[in-house]
Image (cartoon, grey):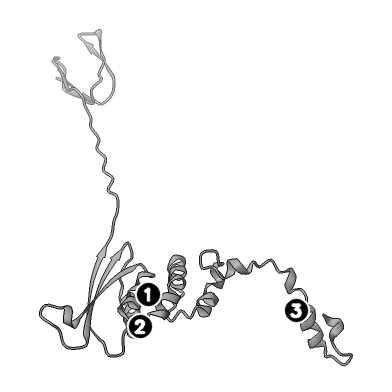
Amino acid sequence: MSELLPPNAAALERAVAEAAGELGSVPVVVREVWNPDTCPPQVLPWLAWAFSVDDWDEAWSDAQKRDSIHVAIAVQRHKGTIGSVKDALGALGIEARVQEWFNQTPAGAPYTFKLWLESNQTPVTQTGIAQVLEIAERLKSLRSHLDEILVRATSQSRVTAASGANLGTEITVGYRYAAVVLNAQAIVLANDRPGPILANAHTIILE
């Protein structure tokens, strides 16, 4: 590449030509870069820009970013409709249901709509609500105005329960000596004669 430069080429021009000549040896598979499923995470913002993703947040999870790129073409194709709002929010893990004014009982104010959000395993925070408002405002029909947002969040988990049981026997042996409580195996001397008593219970009471 550098041989194609004129003799009076500057040092910077020769350095750029030298670097550009090595681009062919960079191990980048173009097909993988243009696929949201196989694109490296650090390249996702550029792929989103190429797909004209309107809303983007670096705080999103990797799955949310890839899903937003997946639905970008469908969102752009139906921009200004209820479907585009639902698709964009669905990519973030939020199931949305739009209820326009003429479908409400009683009917709402003309050209208004309500947004019902159902989130499964995804927390709905004030920051998330702000993003929903921004997405809805950007993708909705210009004649429509958001009247109300209703949120229902669902969280699923497994409950693990455990129980323990203990079985023992309390043995009371009558002796003329003072009461003694033992918590282990014991051998008791009665009247100076060894009389072994094996205790399998937790407590032995000698009276």
Question: Which residue is labeled 3 in the image?
Answer: 20
Instruction: Name the residue rendered at 74%, 71% in the picture.
Output: 24
For the residue pair 111 and 24, the one nearer the viewer reads as: 111
Instruction: Name the residue rendered at 21%, 88% in the picture.
Output: 111
Judge left or right: residue 95 versus residue 168.
right
For the residue pair 160 and 54, the one nearer the viewer reads as: 54
What kind of residue is marked 2? Leu
Residue 104: give x, y in percent of width and height: 15, 78
Q: Residues within 10 Å of mark 1 (few under 14, many from 20)?
A: many
Question: Which residue is labeled 2 in the image?
Answer: 139
Secondary structure beneath label 3: helix
What kind of residue is marked 1? Ala
Instruction: Name the residue rendered at 13%, 82% in the picture.
Output: 107
Picture quarter containing residue 119? bottom left
Looking at the image, residue 12 lies above or below residue 194: below
For the residue pair 44 and 104, the one nearer the viewer reads as: 104
* Mark 2 to mark 1 CA distance (whole Å): 9 Å
Residue 64: give x, y in percent of width and height: 42, 68
Picture quarter containing residue 199? top left
Q: Residues within 10 Å of mark 3 (few under 14, many from 20)?
A: few
Question: Which residue is labeled 1 in the image?
Answer: 88
Quadrant occupied by the N terminus? bottom right
* Mark 1 to mark 3 CA distance (whole Å): 39 Å
Depth-wise, is mark 2 or mark 3 nearer the camera?
2
Instruction: Name the residue rendered at 21%, 26% in the picture.
Output: 167
